Image (spheres, helix red, strand yellow):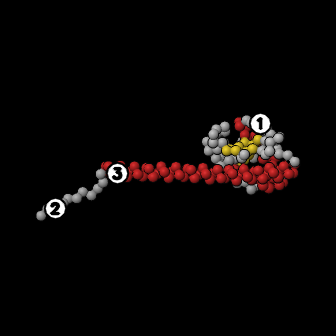
Amino acid sequence: MKTHKYKHGLTLVEMLIVVGVIALLTTMVIGIAARIDNQSKERCLECTCALLEFALQEYCECTGKFPEQPEKDFTNAPLHSEYLCRELHLMPESREVLGKLADSLVKNEYGTVDTPSEIYDPWGTVLDYRYVPGDNFPELISAGPDKIFGTADDISSR
């Protein structure tokens, strides 16, 4: 009588194939999750800009003009955002709309206790505000996912 000895186990090639498939699936899932995260942050930024635009319209209806901020220097973005917050807090209607922003987007990171807050994008970078008299509407600028102003991924409210 013959006895067959079966070896139960995996070869090195089989293990490498399994590890390769798992690595490929993990890479795909991480890429998709990062894309979904960026899309949700972009939607959050759109909603934030829409609320700020509404607050600016309320401010304009009360004062007859938008807060002027003609400087186009991204290094002063915290000051521009602080200026926007201070001006919007002056008008009760604008203040009410500004109060609807998420607490995580309104911070006082660059100032002291006495200075107004700044408005941030979902990536944690301060929003830049600029308005030159004669423009149709003010512009809100986010540095985008790379958190650096002046690059291709900047997001503008225009």
| SS type, badge 3 | helix
* Labels 2 and 1: the sequence-earlier one: 2
* CB atoms of marks 3 and 2 within 8 Å: no
- Badge 2 is on which residue? 3
> Within 10 Å of the Cα at label 2, are there few (<14), some (14-19), or many (20+) other Cα atoms?
few
Against 52, residue 134 (above or below) is: above
| SS type, badge 2 | loop
> Within 10 Å of the Cα at label 3, are there few (<14), some (14-19), or many (20+) other Cα atoms?
few
Q: Which is in the foreground here, disc 2 or disc 1?
A: 1
Q: Amino acid at mark 1?
A: Glu
Q: Residue furthest left?
A: 1
**What is the x, y in percent for residue 1?**
12, 64
> Within 10 Å of the Cα at label 1, are there few (<14), some (14-19), or many (20+) other Cα atoms?
few
Q: Which of these two is toward me, 137 or 71?
A: 137
Marks 1 and 3 sit apart, C-alpha to C-alpha, by 61 Å
Marks 2 and 1 sit apart, C-alpha to C-alpha, by 89 Å
Residue 156 placement, left or right of 10: right
- Badge 3 is on which residue? 15
**What is the x, y in percent for residue 76?**
73, 37
Q: In which quadrant of the rendered view does residue 79 lie?
A: top right
Q: Which of these two is toward me, 71 or 119?
A: 71
**What is the x, y in percent for residue 124?**
65, 46
* CB atoms of marks 2 and 1 within 8 Å: no
Q: Amino acid at mark 2?
A: Thr
Q: Residue sitting at 53 percent across and 52 percent down? A: 32
Q: Which of these two is toward me, 13 or 106?
A: 13
Q: Amino acid at mark 3?
A: Met
Q: Residue sitting at 56 percent across and 50 percent down? A: 35
* Labels 3 and 2: the sequence-earlier one: 2
